[in-house]
Image (tube, rainbow, N blue to C red):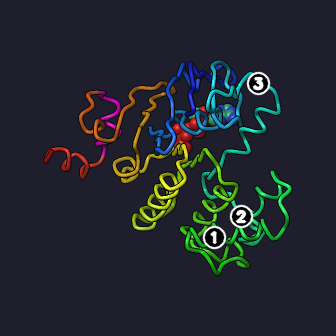
Amino acid sequence: MIKFEHISKSFNGKVVLDDISSHFDPGKINLVIGTSGTGKSVLLKCIVGLIRPSYGNITFDDRDMVGRSRDTIINIKREIGMLFQGGALFDSKTVEQNVMFPLNMLTNMPKNEKLDRVNFYLKRVGLSNSNKKYPNELSGGMQKRVGIARAMVNSPKYLFCDEPNSGLDPKTSLLIDELIQELTYEYDITTVVVTHNLDSIFTLGDYIIFLDQGKKAWEGTSKELFHSDVETLNSFLFASKMMRMIKSYL
Ligand SMILES: Nc1ncnc2c1ncn2[C@@H]1O[C@H](COP(=O)(O)OP(=O)(O)OP(=O)(O)O)[C@@H](O)[C@H]1O
């Protein structure tokens, strides 16, 4: 379980995260949702150790991420898979080289073992014959799948995905969500997804945290989402005419 308590972050005196506490359970998809600029990515970056919070405590299965030794932090980071916003593939590397990158960085695995792993995860995301292709030869959805294979290649205990559906059509978004869901349940991963994609919010999340202007304004299960009386959450979820129509039928 990932636990975070009283997380606050300011940049140049501007408060971006304000006293956020919650937890993410293993084998579940935990969503962090909210409007643009509300602090979702900063919270994610604080949790994975890319940004140091101004205040607060974060533990990964009781191991302290904020105040601990470099070794503990490096060990935790080895167990993290990260799907970055926009994919963040290296354009000059092939698909195979992109997916192998974390293994080169984090392990001393022999080359043939690394290649076996890369091939295993490329097959798992449905890209068996793409090893030698470059990212610009792939569609947006395929690039996301390469990003997922790269995030998974080190068999992470914790998987973080920042806007995995951005720039994708609804059908491809659904395929990416299903893939994240399958991998989470199959490998009992603690998965955290930052999103404002409504389809994902209603179908993907087991547990949801809603941020509003840097504060946690609501948390609960996706079933509870429809019945929340938090005004800011409802105006976020039901901003579109279609969603208001759906709600009126419930
Ligand atoms: N390194 C930084 N330095 C200064 N300000 C930052 C930095 N990173 C983020 N911010 C600010 O923190 C606020 C929250 O940004 P964040 O990226 O977390 O929003 P978000 O909720 O993920 O938005 P979006 O959905 O648009 O990605 C924004 O006002 C942003 O400008």
x%, y% of residue 48? Answer: 66, 37
Label 1: state its secondary structure.
helix
Please rate how many residues cluster around mark 2, counting C-alpha atoms within 10 Å: few if below 14, some from 14 to 19, many from 20: many
**Mark 3 and 1 residues: CB-CB less than 8 Å, in contact?**
no
x%, y% of residue 226? Answer: 26, 39
Q: Which residue is label 1 attached to?
A: 122
x%, y% of residue 241? Answer: 24, 49
Q: Which residue is label 3 attached to?
A: 68
Q: Earlier in the sequence, mark 2 or mark 3?
A: 3
In this view, 250 is above or below 112: above
Answer with the quarter of the image where residue 209 lies: top left
Q: Is residue 61 left or right of residue 196?
A: right
The amino acid marked with disc number 1 is: Leu
Find the distance from the CA under tag 3 to the CA under tag 1: 35 Å
Q: Is residue 122 magenta?
A: no
Q: Which residue is label 2 attached to?
A: 99
Image quadrant, ligand 1: top right
Q: Which residues are magenta?
A: 230-239
- Which residue appears at 67% of the width and 73% of the height? 136
